[in-house]
Image: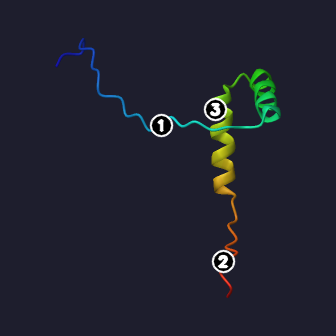
């Protein structure tokens, strides 16, 4: 290999495509925030889901202890 070689390696895709249904009001809020922040709806949804999962407190109502 020389310094002039253009090296291409396989892309490591860590994302998956899913389909969800959301309330129209939430979509409208996401669209407005997307315009204000110059971020895509997808990016905002990923940020929100990541935050929610990191800060989630699960309460198991089936555990009677």
**Residue at (48%, 37%) from the top-left corner?**
16
Residue carrying label 2: 62
Is mark 1 in CB contact (under 8 Å) with mark 3?
A: no
Q: Quadrant of residue 38?
A: top right
2 or 3: tag closer to the N-terminus: 3
Q: Is residue 60 left or right of residue 27?
A: left
Disc 3 on helix, strand or loop? helix
Q: Quadrant of the C terminus?
A: bottom right
Q: Is residue 12 above or below residue 34?
A: below
| Furthest-top residue in this view | 4
* Residues at marks 1 and 3, CA–CA distance in whole angstroms: 12 Å
How far across and how far down the image is residue 29, in percent?
A: 81, 31
2 or 1: tag closer to the N-terminus: 1
Q: Quadrant of the N terminus?
A: top left
* Residues at marks 2 and 3, CA–CA distance in whole angstroms: 35 Å
Other residues around mark 2 within 10 Å, as few (<14) / some (14–19) / many (≥20)? few
Q: Nearer the viewer, residue 63 or 29?
A: 63
Q: Quadrant of residue 53?
A: bottom right
Residue carrying label 3: 43
Q: Is residue 17 left or right of residue 23?
A: left
Q: Is residue 50 left or right of residue 24?
A: left
1 or 3: tag closer to the N-terminus: 1
Q: Which mark is residue 3?
A: none
Q: Nearer the viewer, residue 45 or 17?
A: 17
Q: Quadrant of residue 24?
A: top right
Residue carrying label 1: 15
């Amino acid at each position: 290999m020389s310094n002039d070689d253009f090296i291409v390696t396989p892309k490591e895709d860590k994302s998956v495509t899913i389909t969800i249904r959301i309330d129209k009001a939430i979509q409208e809020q996401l669209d407005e925030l997307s315009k204000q922040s110059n971020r895509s709806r997808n990016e905002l949804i990923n940020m929100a889901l990541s935050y929610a999962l990191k800060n989630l407190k699960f309460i198991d109502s089936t555990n009677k202890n």
